[in-house]
Amino acid sequence: MPAAGRVRVSAPQPRARVRDWHRLDRPDMVASWDALARWASEPNPFYESWYLLASLHALDPRGKVRLFTLEVDGQLAGLLPLRRATSYYGHPLPHWRGWAHANCFLGAPLVARGFERLFWHELLAWADRHAGLAPFLHLACVPARGPLHDALVDELAATGRAAATVRLEERAMLSGNLDAESYLEASLSTKKRKELRRQHRRLAEEGELTSEHRQDSDGLGEWIADFLALEKSGWKGRQGSALGCDPATAALFEQALHGAARQGRLDRLALRLDGRPIAMLASFVALPGAFSFKTAYDESLSRFSPGVLMQLEALTRRDPREVRWIDSCAAQDHPMIDHLWRERRPVASLSLGIGGPLHRAAFAAIARRETGRPPTGLSA
């Protein structure tokens, strides 16, 4: 028995399991999921309920994706979508991977603050038990710094588990507490700022130039239709990669924006010329930051750089005391945003060895072949 006057505090009881995603598409589970997102150590709107469920309904109707969840004392403390895959970047190679798609721009799991190390421990232990033919777990587009990364580095070092960074990119990011004018002075030359002011004046001579900024759901259906049409009118439409070219991605976009609006997380901006949209931007607010989700502009007006002018408008509307950073969600070396935003966010694709000794040996050989060096682990 405990000594008189002492209270025995039991250790948190974790429960890790993998479930059909349909089982979490219920009001009670969504409420727990949303609570996890509010307490997450690092925000990731693409794995929140309103975006991930929209993605799964649109892109995984057969239910091949599973949701790994960590519960601690009955409360949801971590979540990551997983899928068993047979192709690895075009090579026939079985593996487990964090599930994402072309319009999911971050693969970081949702993990409650303080449970980062426990989450990685339980996820990798589960993967060991369910490796099957898979010698590794692949996680694409995860932050290469921050509490989740640091906890993973610590877990790998403590257990001696092999891991490899197979890809590392730095994408444009906006951060800091400078106002818009000061930020642009630091980012752009005097000549470039003068040219942008000239383009704005010239564009305004073409008709009535207005900007529209909304953070609610008023007129959202029409806004979505305008965006899909504007994006489809450009090069993405000609290549067949515009959201509106596929009913599934169009539905995803519509459901995700309505879901974000219901959560008070949607920020949308449009430049209009005589009432018609010429540049549009949809962003997801995930305090203390935000994510630039999708942008489109009228290519017939390219000589006026409407997409750049819209980004300048967005910069003036940002309150750095509230939104401390914005992830561009753009590819590395993006020809437009890289010149405007000076900061960079490193994102990595990682492979982690799982299973028994034969699996680990196979992974070591695969990783050495892919990266040219042994999978000794990750750097802090």
Image (cartoon, rainbow, N blue to C red):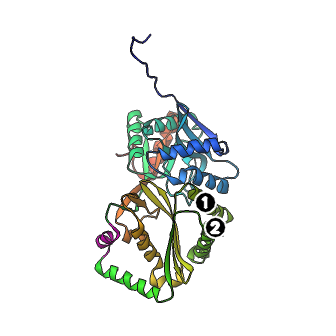
Q: Quadrant of the C terminus?
A: top left
Foreground pick, 252 / 145: 252
Residue 130, compared with residue 287, is above or below; it is above
Q: Residue at x 39, y 57 (%)?
A: 322
- In the rendered structure, are the residues bearing label 2 and label 1 in contact, judged by CB atoms less than 8 Å apart? no
Q: Where is residue 280? Give x, y as percent.
A: 52, 72
Q: Quadrant of the N terminus?
A: top left
- Residue at image mark 1: 258
Residue 176, compared with residue 14, is above or below; it is below
Q: Is residue 287 visible?
A: yes
Left or right of 90 in this view: 245 = right
CA distance for labels 2 and 1:
8 Å
Q: Residue at x 46, y 35 (%)?
A: 118
On whether residue 183 falls in the magenta region, the answer is yes
Looking at numbered disc 2 in the image, what kind of residue is underneath it? Gly
Q: Where is residue 41? Give x, y as percent.
A: 43, 45
Looking at numbered disc 1 in the image, what kind of residue is underneath it? His
Q: Where is residue 74? Give x, y as percent.
A: 56, 32
On whether residue 324 falls in the magenta region, the answer is no
Q: Residue at x 47, y 41 (%)?
A: 112
- Secondary structure at badge 1 equals helix
Q: Quadrant of residue 200?
A: bottom left
Dominant secondary-structure state across the stretch colored magenta: helix
Q: Farthest right residue?
A: 62
Sequence-first tag of 2 and 1:
2
Residue 327, compared with residue 151, is above or below; it is below
Q: Which residues are magenta?
A: 179-188
- Residue at image mark 2: 221
Q: Is residue 161 visible?
A: no
Q: Quadrant of residue 289?
A: bottom left
